[in-house]
Every structure is written in structure tokens, then in C-alpha cells.
Amino acid sequence: MGVPMKRIDLTAIPETGQHYRFRIDPEDWRPVEEEEGAVAPAGPMEFEAEIQRAGRRMILNGHLQGRIRVRCDRCLKRFERDVDTRFRTFLALPKEMGAEAEIELGDEDLEVEFTPEEEIDALDLVREQLLLEQPMKNLCSESCKGLCSSCGADLNEGACSCSSDQGHPAFRKLEALKIKGEQD
């Protein structure tokens, strides 16, 4: 059985706008290879979108709520956290131009997502917003000790057998250097 598509036909949006609501279950999620494991729904997620027309462009106001599973950047263990985010994105329908046409983008075009088709997949919007919503570092806890840089042991589970005075391997050669006039 294939993954259900949650498509939004941008050409069918009336002048008054359109409201969409989707429930995204973990089994709907199709991981993309380059972000495999970066983020995934841990349970059902609710996605709402209000799309308004603005000429050939659309304004999408969205709300995404649920629970996600991410990997800790220090200890590499998976953990779950809540997501409740509101966002706005601008969409532009494809132009009827030849493939060879050269297009110059203006400053206002830098905030617009140009859709290659007249339909968009709500799952792609959700994936993009989840990735944009991620902090610089995902930590399972502020007190996470991470992994030992020498042996890879999880320091949250206890101390490893490595010598604590080893320091970072890149600086071991500096220990052998002596400053002129320095004594042992």
C-alpha cells in the first residue's frame, strides 16, 4: 500500500481563499535520504493551512502541532519533543514560459516559493517547516554529557575507561613542545 497523498490544488483556490486541515500519521511519513532520521513524527500531527490568493501568488498561513522524534546532537539517542508552530509562506504558480527563458528575480521574489506544479503536497510543506523549526542543536537534556571523543562511550551512562587528561587528539602534539626557558 502506497503513502497517501495530501495534495492541494492551487488552481482550485477561490478568490475568497480556502482552508485545509490534514492529519499526518507517522506511517504517512516518507523519509528523504539526505535527512534520514533528522526528524519524524512520533505520533499524529495536525496541519492546518489557510491559503489566500494575491494575483498569481498565494499566501499560505499554516499551523503545525504534534510530537516529533529527533536525534540528540551530543549522545545520538532519539528523543521526542512537542511542536506547535505557526508559519507563513508565499507560493507562486509556474509561469507559462519556455524552458530557455531567462528570469531575473527581484527582492520580493526571494521570499516566494516557486512551485514547479499547480499542486503541492502538504507532506512536503510539513517536512520543510519541521526542518526549519529545528534548533541549532537538538539536545535530549541541557545536562547531556554526550559521547567520549576517544572511545565513543555514552557519558550519560557513566564515566568511560579513557584517561581524562588526554584532551582533544588534535592538540596532543602541542604537549611535546617546550617554550624556550621553560623547565620540566
Image (spheres, rainbow, N blue to C red):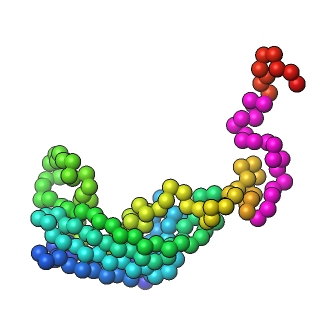
State the predominant SS element of the stretch in magenta. Answer: loop
Q: Position of 72 compared to 33: left or right?
A: right
Image coordinates for residue 108, horizontal then vertical, percent = 20, 52
Outermost residue toward the top in this view? 181
Q: Is residue 4 magenta?
A: no
Q: Quadrant of residue 84?
A: bottom left
Q: Quadrant of residue 124?
A: bottom left
Q: Is residue 172 magenta?
A: yes
Query: Does residue 60 show up?
Result: yes
- Which residue: 79% across, 62% down? 158
Image coordinates for residue 58, horizontal then vertical, percent = 19, 67
Viewer-proximal residue among 115 and 51: 51
Image coordinates for residue 40, horizontal then vertical, percent = 49, 71
Image coordinates for residue 18, horizontal then vertical, percent = 20, 79
The C terminus sits in image quarter = top right
- Which residue: 43% across, 66% down? 130
Q: Position of 124 compared to 56: left or right?
A: right
Q: Is residue 9 above or below residue 104?
A: below
The N terminus sits in image quarter = bottom left
- Which residue: 78% across, 30% down? 175
Q: Is residue 33 above or below residue 16?
A: above
Viewer-proximal residue among 38 and 47: 47
Query: Does residue 28 show up?
Result: no
Q: Position of 45 compared to 70: left or right?
A: left
Q: Position of 127 compared to 48: left or right?
A: right
Viewer-proximal residue among 19 and 85: 85
Viewer-proximal residue among 148 and 11: 148
The segment highlighted magenta reads: 157-175
Q: How many numbered badges does the structure rendering display?
A: 0
- Which residue: 22% across, 67% down? 59
